[in-house]
Structure formats: C-alpha cells, structure tokens
Image (cartoon, rainbow, N blue to C red):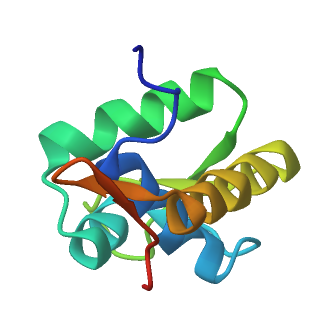
C-alpha cells in the first residue's frame, strides 16, 4: 500500500513545529534545532513543500555585515490546513500490534 503524501515522521515533525505559530516566519536552522532534523532531511522537505505551494518563502537580509541573508519559511493557508489534517490523522489512526488493533492514546 503506497504511503499517503506528507505523512512521514519527519514531515509531521516539521508540520508540528510550523503549526505552533503558523503566521511566524521561521528559518531553516531554527526548524532544524526544534525538530532535530538534519539539514539533509529538512531542506529537501522544505523545498518539496514550497514547490507544492504549502510553504511560502522569503529572504531576510542580515543586520550583521558579511552575514548572508536567511531563507525564511511559513505555512500557506493550504499548508496549514493540510498540516492540521495530517497531524490529526496521525493521532486518530489505530495501530496494529500482534494482529490486534489498538487505539492510540497519545
């Protein structure tokens, strides 16, 4: 059975972090620290979500001379809706242990 898009544990962790304050612009390093996702995992997810118009992006210039601008991210309205749906489905989904279905309690 194929995986439903946007349900990997890594993507769900990113969705959770972004939904904490959906209107706040976040930069990659901040998201990496909060989610514990390595850059090689995080940035491909950010790029994919941006291409799918689930994230909006902008560049924030640095106040410090010589420091490059930072790429900022936040959920679009469609992205926030999808994130909420995917996280809700994760909580509601029963899991199978030893052939028996058990409801999640967390």
In this rendering, the answer to whether 26 lies above or below 56 is below
Q: Residue at x 34, y 73 (%)?
A: 30
Q: Position of residue 55 (x, y in %)?
A: 66, 43
Figure disc tally: 0
Q: Residue furthest right?
A: 77
> Which quadrant is the C terminus positioned in?
bottom left
The one nearer the camera, 41 or 26, is 41
Q: Residue at x 31, y 39 (%)?
A: 43
Q: Position of residue 21 (x, y in %)?
A: 67, 81
The one nearer the camera, 18 or 74, is 18
Q: Position of residue 54 (x, y in %)?
A: 69, 38
The one nearer the camera, 26 or 15, is 15
> Which quadrant is the N terminus positioned in?
top left
Q: Describe residue 60's horizontal placement relative to residue 82 as left or right.
A: left
Q: Residue at x 44, y 56 (%)?
A: 12
The one nearer the camera, 91 or 79, is 91
Q: Describe residue 92's horizontal placement relative to residue 95 as left or right.
A: right
In this rendering, the answer to whether 90 lies above or below 36 is above
Q: Position of residue 90 (x, y in %)?
A: 51, 59
Q: Residue at x 87, y 52 (%)?
A: 77
């Amino acid at each position: 059975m194929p995986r439903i898009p946007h349900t990997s544990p890594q993507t769900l962790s990113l969705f959770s972090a972004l939904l904490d304050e959906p209107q706040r612009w976040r930069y990659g390093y901040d998201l990496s620290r909060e989610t514990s996702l390595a850059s090689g995992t995080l940035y491909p997810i950010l790029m994919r979500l941006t291409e799918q118009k689930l994230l909006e992006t902008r560049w924030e210039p640095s106040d410090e001379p010589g420091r490059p601008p930072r790429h900022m991210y936040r959920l679009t309205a469609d992205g926030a809706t999808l994130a909420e749906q995917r996280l809700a489905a994760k909580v509601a989904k029963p899991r199978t242990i030893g052939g028996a279905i058990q409801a999640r309690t967390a």
